[in-house]
Amino acid sequence: MSMRYRRLGTSGLQVSELSLGSWLTFGKQVGDETAEALMKVAYDNGINFFDNAEIYSRGESERVMGRILKRMEWPRDTWIVSSKAFFGSGGKQPTQLGLHRKHVVEACHAALDRLQVDYLDLYFCHRPDPNTPISETVWTMHQLIMQGKVLYWGTSEWSAEEIKEAHAVAGKHHLIAPVMEQPQYNMFHREKVESEFAPLYGTVGLGTTIWSPLASGVLTGKHSLEGDASSRLRMAGLDWLRERELNEARLRTVEELKNIAQSVGLTLPVFAIAWCLRNPHVSTVILGASRTAQLEENLHAVEAQDLLTPAVMAEVQRVIER
Ligand code: NDP
C-alpha cells in the first residue's frame, strides 16, 4: 500500500489522502495501548495527519495523543496535528466556549499543553459562533499564526456564507484567511461538500478534511437496526448517534452498496472510503478506528479508488439517490 498526498486547498501543505482522527475512541472507547497501535499503523503507512479537538473526551483525547507523539519521537516535520475550539473541554461557562478571542486563545494554549507541541499545524473553529463577530475570530486566528502557535486555520461545519465572510474580512485587512473546512461527507451526507461549497473551491481555494466517511460505521455493512454490539453505536450515552445514523432505509441501501463493492472485489468500508477519495475537492479523508485491523483494511482505499470507474460511480449514484 502506497500512500498518496494532496494539497490542502490552495495552501502548499501536502496532507495524506487518509488521516486518523480520535473522536469517541482515544480516551474513551479504546485504551492507550490501542491508541498507540493505531497511530503506529497510520504513521508507518504514510498517514501524516492526526486530527483532534478540545472537546474529544474533554481534553483526554489530546492528552493521550500528546503522550504517544512524545513517546514515538517521530520527527516533528513528518506529521501534522490539529485541534479545534468552540465546544470547550468540559467547562460550560460563557468564557469557556465559543469563538471569541478569549476562548480561542485559551483553547489554543490548552491544546498545545495537552498535545505537548510548540505549535498546532491546523487549528479549526469547530462550529460557527453566532455570538462572536466573524471578524474577531479572523483577527484572533491571524494573531495566533503571527505568534507561531498555529500554522494554518480553518472551520468545521460552517456555511459557505460564513466562510466567504471570513475571507472578505481577511482580504480587507490583509490577514491570513482560513484554508480548510471540516465537513461531514459520506454516501449518505453529500450536500455541503458537493453543492453548498461548490462555488468556494475555485474562488477561495477551499481544502476539505472530511469526517465520518463511514457514517460512524453504518457504511461498513456490519450493523443491524440495534447496532453491532461491540461498536460505538451501542455505547452508553450515544443513543443520539445511533438514532441519527441507523435506520431501515439506510440498511437497505447498504445492502445494495455492498453488492456493488463486491462486484469490483472490495469490502464495503474500503469501497465507501474510496468513493470519498474520488471527489477531487476532498483533501483528506479522516478515518476513525477502534481496532488496528479496521485501519489496516481501510488503508486499501488509496489504491481502491482506481477501481471506481465512472460506470461504478454512476451505479452508486443511482442507489444513493433513489
Ligand atoms: P467513520 O465514519 O469512518 O467511523 C469510524 C468507526 O467505524 C470506527 O471507529 C469503527 O467503530 C467503525 N469502523 C471503521 N472501519 C471499520 C471497518 N473496516 N470494519 C468495521 N468497522 C469499522 O469516522 P468517524 O466518525 O470516526 O470520524 C473520523 C474522524 O473525523 C474523527 O475521529 C474526528 O477526528 C473527525 N470528526 C470531526 C467532526 C467535526 O465536527 N469536525 C465530527 C466527527 C468526526 P466501531 O468499531 O465502534 O464500530
Image: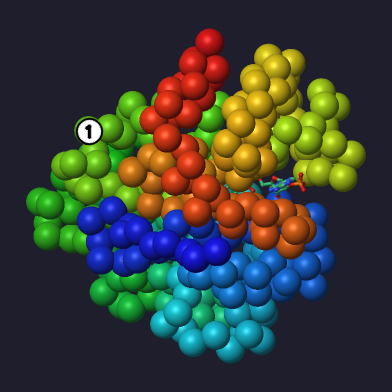
Q: Position of residue 121 (x, y in %)?
A: 41, 70
Q: Nearer the viewer, residue 147 or 195?
A: 195
- Mark count: 1
Q: Please tell me how crowded label 1 is: few (under 14), some (14-19), or many (20+) other residues with Cα within 10 Å.
A: few
Q: Nearer the viewer, residue 42 or 69?
A: 42
Q: Nearer the viewer, residue 287 or 165?
A: 287
Instruction: Determine whether 186 is above or below 320 in the image.
Output: below
User: Is residue 194 something that shows in the picture?
Assistant: yes
Q: Position of residue 182 (x, y in %)?
A: 44, 47
The residue that label 1 is drawn on is 199
Instruction: Determine whether 146 is above or below 12 in the image.
Output: below
Q: Position of residue 80 (x, y in %)?
A: 46, 71
Q: Position of residue 254 (x, y in %)?
A: 67, 25
Quick check: 65 left or right of 201? right
Quick check: 157 left or right of 97? left
User: Is residue 131 something that shows in the picture?
Assistant: no
For image coordinates 81% across by 66% down, the residue present is 31
What amino acid type is highlighted by mark number 1?
Answer: Pro
For image coordinates 49% across by 21% down, the residue present is 315
Secondary structure beneath dot 1 equals: helix
Q: What kind of colouring is applied to the model shown?
A: rainbow
Instruction: Determine whether 174 is above or below 257 in the image.
Output: below
Disc 1 within 8 angstroms of ligand 1 (CB): no
Q: Quadrant of the N terminus?
A: bottom right
For image coordinates 31% across by 34% down, the residue present is 197
Q: Residue furthest right?
A: 229
For image coordinates 10% across by 51% down, the residue present is 172
